[in-house]
Image (cartoon, helix red, strand yellow):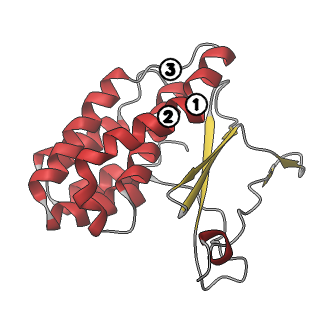
Amino acid sequence: MSSKSDTWPKLPIMRLKDKVTKEYVNPLQIFQINDTYILAIYQGNISKFDMLLKYRQRNSKNKSGWSNQRTPRHIHWAVDILIKMHQDKKLTKKLVTFLLSEWNKTIAHKTKKQRLSDLTIKKLIPRTAKEAKQFYKLNKYGEYSVKFLLLMAKLLMQQEKNNLKTAYMFRKLLEKLEAGEDIFSIVQSATYRGGR
């Protein structure tokens, strides 16, 4: 019988090539989620506290065992929520309502110390894991685990608030999902680029 460490691929390197300097940079923080996802946060270039998010997903078809680095977008998140909502509308709406309350609590980082404190593994992972327990049934549907969705959503909210304290795109998307608006309206909200 093989152990988990024998069957799971080694964690991939999460360095990122800077588009301007062409040099590789290390992430500010790395989160390993459920042995399936690795999410990394890098310093972005839109604002002083901009965050660039990248993730890799375990992929047995890839030689390394992991996908290439991907940038999470609102549309990825929204499609997964729509799939979950199709399967369990009541619980998914509860998740969306919870995320709206998280949106209202999210404030832009004003100092490096605040950002480092807010983005620690000790602060984010246990809290997210605890919150995910009430929605665990939704793990059966869609591509992403609830734990990964929660963490990604919180970081996307933080990214937007850091770049523009009056940002509202993610909130609008959540409101449309909660109201059960048509798929075209939801996709339009999720794909608005607004200069990013």
For the residue pair 151 and 108, the one nearer the viewer reads as 151
Q: Amino acid at mark 2?
A: Leu
Q: Position of residue 160 (x, y in %)?
A: 48, 33
Dot placed on the residue nearer the N-terminal end, 2 or 3: 3
SS type, badge 1: loop
Q: Quadrant of the C terminus?
A: top right
Q: Which residue is the site of mark 1? A: 119
- Whether tag 2 and tag 1 are in contact, CB under 8 A, the answer is yes
Q: Nearer the viewer, residue 143 or 50?
A: 143
Whole-percent x and y of residue 39? 59, 51
**How far apart are the two marked residues, 3 and 1, measured between alpha carbons?**
12 Å
N-terminal-most mark, 2 or 1: 1
Circle 1: is it few (<14), some (14-19), or many (20+) Cα within 10 Å?
some
Disc 2 versus disc 1: distance between alpha carbons? 7 Å
| 127 up-or-down from 25: above or below | above
Q: Secondary structure at mark 3?
A: loop
Give the residue at x 23% y 44%: 96
Q: CA distance from mark 2 to mark 3?
A: 16 Å
Residue at 70% in and 62% down: 11
Q: Secondary structure at mark 2?
A: helix
At label 3, counting other C-alpha atoms closer than 10 Å, the crowd grade (few under 14, some 14-19, many 20 or more) is: some
- Frontmost of labels 2 and 1 is 2
- Residue 192 in the image: x percent, y percent? 40, 49
Q: Is residue 78 left or right of residue 47?
A: left
Find residue 42 and report its image quarter. top right
Q: Which residue is mark 2?
A: 124
| Amino acid bearing label 1 | Leu
Q: Quadrant of residue 128?
A: top left
Identify the residue position indicated by label 3 in the image: 108
Left or right of 64? Residue 182 is left
